Amino acid sequence: MPAILIDGRAVAKDWKEKAAVRAQEWVLKGITPHLAVVLVGEDAASQVYVRNKENACRKAAIRSTVIRLAADCTQQALEQTVRELNADASVHGILVQLPLPKHLDESRVLALIDPDKDVDGFHAMNSGRLMNGQRGFVPCTPLGVMKLLEAYNISVQGKHAVVIGRSNIVGKPMAMLLLGANATVTICHSRTQDLPAITCQADILVAAVGKAGFVTADMVKPGAAVIDVGINRTENGLAGDVAPEVADVAGWLTPVPGGVGQMTIAMLLSNTLDAVQMHGI
């Protein structure tokens, strides 16, 4: 039996509608939720991502301000922009669109963002909060994955979850969220030996490696929930990290497009509204 496709668009639509209701409640109190996005340079993918975020904010009655800086802007200019946003009481959430041009120090910039405005959840303080099970902002993509699992009643507790990828943006926080939900978690990466032997044990398999079709059917336990975080641009269009034939083995599968990607922006809206609440304005 083919895998049940997890409809990220439908779940994200529900979360965006909830965000619109929450935002309107703040507007009625005289407060307009405000997300500021810093975009450096003309990277085509980043331009698309930022435009999608702007559109989602507009539909949810969240004010969106995009600060566009030249690709050759200095580290000092970028850091000053972040400081000004930190000091602006009307701004509730700050997002610096990644990746940055190579001459800029990404880690320094992310460390400068006020942790209570860090709606991307990349600041070390928010990473530490996640590690310690404390309240804080969680990166939007792994948070979205957890909400998809919840929406489809896919049990996490006591299950073996395998995450392929160890980035600070997806892999590591994904593992921490699954661990916090009482899964037994294995993190795999480019140095993992006999990867298929490990992935075949997974009740929940999360692929976040950035290689089209990397996960093949022989790497998947029959009936497993397979979450494809990859978005790869190929000559045939967008493709995930999971090969199409996995649908014949898995129990559940997120499609690309139409799966996890839709949830990322929905969680950004939710985080921004959490930031309004956190500021206690």
Image (cartoon, helix red, strand yellow):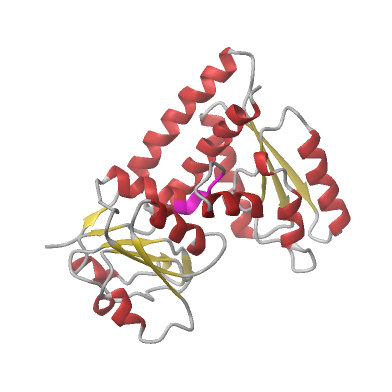
Residue found at the far left of this picture: 1
Residue depicted at 81% across the width and 52% down the height: 78
In the image, 153 versus 53, the foreground residue is 153
Left or right of 71? Residue 184 is left
**Residue 147 appears left or right of 35:** left
Using the rendered view, name the quadrant where residue 192 is placed: bottom left
Q: Is residue 268 above or below residue 222?
A: above
Residue 24's x, y, as percent? 52, 20
Residue found at x 51% / y 30%? 59
* Residue drawn at (33%, 58%) of the image: 183
User: Residue 78: within the magenta?
Assistant: no
In the rendered structure, which segment of residues is drawn in magenta?
A: 137-142
Residue 82, position in %: x, y? Answer: 78, 45
Q: In screen coordinates, is 9 left or right of 234?
A: left
- Where, quadrant-wise, is the N terminus in this rendering? bottom left
Is residue 123 visible in this depiction of the protein?
no
Q: Is residue 20 visible?
A: yes
Going by the picture, which residue comes out furthest to the front?
A: 132
Residue 141 belongs to the span the image colors magenta: yes
Q: Position of residue 25 (x, y in %)?
A: 52, 18
User: In screen coordinates, is 239 left or right of 203?
Assistant: right
Figure quadrant of the C terminus: top right
